[in-house]
Amino acid sequence: MILLILILVKLLSPELASAKVVNTSLCNTNDNNWAFVKEKNKIKLYERWITLNDSQAVRERKGELLTTCSFDLVEKYLRNCNTASEWFIGIKSIDSFSDSSHHLLRINIELPWPFTNRELIARYSFFKTDSKHSVIKVMSTNNYHQQKKQNKHYEASWTIERISDELTKITFKTFSNEAPKFPQWIQEPVIKKVFTNNLLRLKKRLSEL
């Protein structure tokens, strides 16, 4: 039960040093300095420390996988926000809505007692960089009323790369600035396991398309 609580509480908020709001324009986000963590079923996991606002160090995670699902199908699947609940453990529902300038997601996260359920409202963006690459980004926003306890700042991105007609590479990156709920020696192995298992579930789901 303790492990289940740890998994769900930290699902969308990897452990970090503090809880102040992030100005992502000030992040050190060059794509270097990744440390290899492990590989499972041909899914590779990396992590690194990045600096926010020139002072706050946070842990960013990255997972890489290859799928025999075509580029177009992967892109279509990941662009459909409702599919996240099929592979992302803990997500109860995702609703999409828009304001005058952004496409937004309202993500409902179920947590067991004694924790309250959480809600994440995030901006959703899709970029087609060229015929072989596309990027999906999700970034939390606090500009909207939230009915439940909200997650602190959270960012995630999927980079989709066409390797061949029947082979596609997916790179998933995520970080949050939410303060840790438990000692790192307890929660860190659990977070890594959940992160890896989510990617395993995604890879399996894509193989079924």
Image: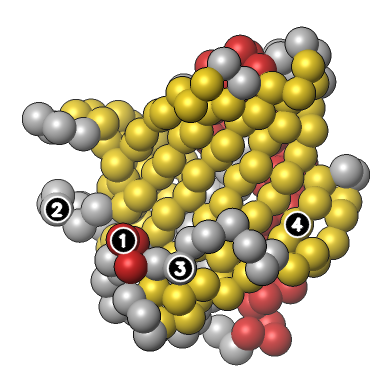
**Residue that carries the numbered disc 3 in the rendered image:** 28
Q: Earlier in the sequence, mark 4 or mark 2?
A: 4
Task: Tell me the tag on residue 13.
Answer: none
Q: Mark 4 to mark 3: distance in Å?
A: 20 Å
Residue closest to the eye, 50 or 189: 50
Task: Tell me the residue at 72%/32% (across/down).
Answer: 169
Residue closest to the eye, 9 or 63: 63
**Residue that carries the numbered disc 1 in the rendered image:** 25
Q: Mark 4 to mark 2: distance in Å?
A: 33 Å
Q: Please name which of the two marks, 1 or 4, marks the residue nearer to the observer.
A: 1
Q: Quadrant of residue 78?
A: top right
**Residue that carries the numbered disc 2 in the rendered image:** 143
Q: Earlier in the sequence, mark 1 or mark 4?
A: 1
Q: Please name which of the two marks, 1 or 2, marks the residue nearer to the observer.
A: 1
Q: Quadrant of residue 19?
A: bottom left
Residue 82 seen in this snapshot: no
Quarter of the picture containing the N terminus is bottom right
Amino acid type of disc 3?
Asn
Task: Tell me the residue at 45%/76% (across/down).
Answer: 51
Q: Please name which of the two marks, 4 or 2, marks the residue nearer to the observer.
A: 4
Amino acid type of disc 4?
Leu
Per the image, label 3 sits on a secondary structure element best described as loop
Residue 107 x/y as whole percent: 37, 43
Quarter of the picture containing the C terminus is top right
Q: Earlier in the sequence, mark 3 or mark 2?
A: 3
Per the image, label 1 sits on a secondary structure element best described as helix
Q: Mark 1 to mark 2: distance in Å?
A: 18 Å
